[in-house]
Image: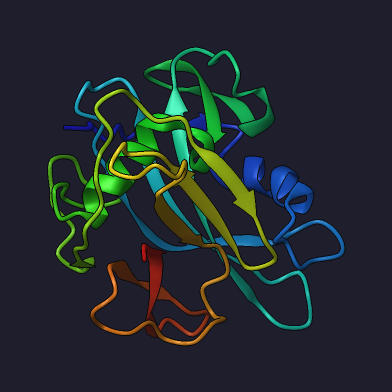
Amino acid sequence: MAEIHETTVKPGKLELLARWLPTRHWYLGAGSPALTKAGGFRLDDPAGEVGIELMVVTDTAGEEPVVYLVPMTYRGAPVEGLDHALIGTAEHGVLGQRWFYDAAHDTVFIEQAARLLAGKATPQDQNTSDTPDLTVHVVPGDIVIPDTGFRPTVIDTDTHTDIAFDSGRSANAGAELIRLHRRLHTGAPLQRDRSHVDAPWATADGSLRREVFLSAP
């Protein structure tokens, strides 16, 4: 189980994201974001080495607020081959230097997201150690976890990021698919029988909305 430390992170996560978001294909703003945290949850790395957080942030820099979902992994050392997914580095008051990655490219996150969509992982509270987040709803589906590791293909669009990987149950590479819904206030509702994960996030006036974070065919 991940342990949440009450300490400082410098620069903070919102500072790192404010620098990184404008480089993303799905970012709508024209300048520097003005970000506030609006929700999210965590997943556990069974090995206890990697922090996994799905953070919701609201950007109020434009005429209308835009809400983004940013899954991140936190690591104690840089990962070879993930330079393109690096959000930034920060100094953690307890753990020391940490490397923050866009989790869509990190196989530790991909495996746990697949397990979550398959009903085999438990979402964890964003701010409290060893506490399941009961506000997160999962409609599990038929996702096969590969035995030989993940070799994902990641495709960004204007509204979402698709993560395709081969489970070995099909002759077609990329038979499995996870979709990250990057902008939470857009898109039609999913059919209730489609595999997905939905969770609440807070609007600027303090009210709660519930949106799909992750989905699979």
Q: Residue at x 38, y 40 (%)?
A: 110
Instruction: Reply above or below: 177 against 16.
Output: below
Q: Position of residue 135 (x, y in %)?
A: 20, 69
| Rendering quarter of residue 149 | top left
Q: Residue at x 30, y 47 (%)?
A: 114
Q: Is residue 86 visible?
A: no
| Rendering quarter of residue 95 | top left
Q: Position of residue 148 (x, y in %)?
A: 30, 23
Q: Position of residue 100 (x, y in %)?
A: 54, 31
View extreme (front): residue: 171
Q: Taking 30 as reference, is 52 left or right?
A: left
Instruction: Reply above or below: 160 against 108.
Output: below
Q: Position of residue 189 (x, y in %)?
A: 41, 86
Q: Taking 81 as reference, is 172 left or right?
A: left
Q: Quadrant of the C terminus?
A: bottom left
Q: Quadrant of the N terminus?
A: top left
View extreme (right): residue: 30
The answer to which of 161 and 166 lies nearer the viewer is 166
